[in-house]
């Protein structure tokens, strides 16, 4: 299979990215088609849909071998579960899937049709294999049982961003930053309150500490 597009996001690295799409609705991305697929006819009527599926490659996690079990960080990093019971990137075929909101389809003179989306969970430059419309009547099962993921979803941290820091970045990025930090980007087995964590977001380097259920941003500096 050949990548048909790439998505451009605020995440140059994997650390800090939400574990699932749609969790942080404020996070934006731009899907830019590769030159052979910049045909406006290919996205005709797509703007009638509010959400789309993106099928993509875990391009930072490709391996020659595979393991039938993995250790999800959200379970503490020591519990092994079957790889097909997870969305781990370390799988026989490193394919990811994300349901994202389609904000709009724009026409770029040089790039052709560009899809502006939100609720992303992908690193900058991720190859996109396919795009499909999200169908609520077929793709949504409100009563579905979600295994161990159900027990972990919804556990959020209280995020504190001092005013002296928040005023240095745009409001829309502040909202997005709060949303992704509330989801706790750390592996669950790391709980040292004195440890300083850092990750790249947009054009900034963000550093924070976590003490119990409170996450405090200690600096946001331009890279």
Image (cartoon, grey):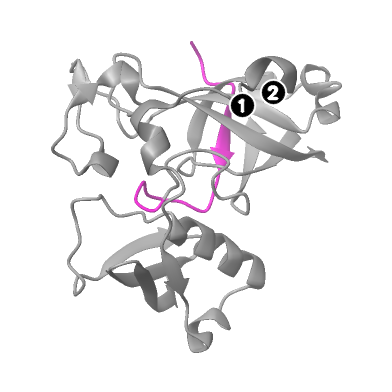
Q: As displayed, is residue 44 above or below residue 119?
A: above
Q: Judge left or right: residue 145 versus residue 135.
A: left
Mark 1 crowdedness (10 Å alpha carbons): few <14, some 14-19, many ≥20: few
Mark 2–mark 1 Cα distance, whole angstroms, equals 15 Å
Instruction: Using the image as rendered, state which of residue 179 and residue 115 is in the foreground.
Output: 179
Please tell me which residue is depicted at 53% across the width and 59% down the height of the picture. 179
Q: Nearer the viewer, residue 146 or 85?
A: 146
As drawn, is 126 to the left or to the right of 120? left
Q: Position of residue 56 (x, y in %)?
A: 49, 25
Residue 66 position in % (x across, y down)? 20, 17
In the image, farthest residue toward the bottom: 164
Residue 87 visible in the shown view: no
Mark 2 lies on residue? 134
Quadrant in which the C terminus is drawn: bottom left
The verdict on residue 12 being magenta is yes
Does the magenta segment cover residue 188? no
SS class, disc 2:
loop
Task: Give the image location of residue 202, x and y in percent.
Answer: 51, 60
Q: Earlier in the sequence, mark 2 or mark 1?
A: 2
Residue 88: quadrant of the picture: top left
Few, some or many residues within 10 Å of mark 2 (<14, 14–19, 20+): some
Secondary structure of the residue carrying numbered label 1:
loop
Boundaries of the magenta span? 1-16
Residue at the image point whose x is 65% and y is 72% from the top: 171
- Which label number is shown at residue 67? none
């Amino acid at each position: 299979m050949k990548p048909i597009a790439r998505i451009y996001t605020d995440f140059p690295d994997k650390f800090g990215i939400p574990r699932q799409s749609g969790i942080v609705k404020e996070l934006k991305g731009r899907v830019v088609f590769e030159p052979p697929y910049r045909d406006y006819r290919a996205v005709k009527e797509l703007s009638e849909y509010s959400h789309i599926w993106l099928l993509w490659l875990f391009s930072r996690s490709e391996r020659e071998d595979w393991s039938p079990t993995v250790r999800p960080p959200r379970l503490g990093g020591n519990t092994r579960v079957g790889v097909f019971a997870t969305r781990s990137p370390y799988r026989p075929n490193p394919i990811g899937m994300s349901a994202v909101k389609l904000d709009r389809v724009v026409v770029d003179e040089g790039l052709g049709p560009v899809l502006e989306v939100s609720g992303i969970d992908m690193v900058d430059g991720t190859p996109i294999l396919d795009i499909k419309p999200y169908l609520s009547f077929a793709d949504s099962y409100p009563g579905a049982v979600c295994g161990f993921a159900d027990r972990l979803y919804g556990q959020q941290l209280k995020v504190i961003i001092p005013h002296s820091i928040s005023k240095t970045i745009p409001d829309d990025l502040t909202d997005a930053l709060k949303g992704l930090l509330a989801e706790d980007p750390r592996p669950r087995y790391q709980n040292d309150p004195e440890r300083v964590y850092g990750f790249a977001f947009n054009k900034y380097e963000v550093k924070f500490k976590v003490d119990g259920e409170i996450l405090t941003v200690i600096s946001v500096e331009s890279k």
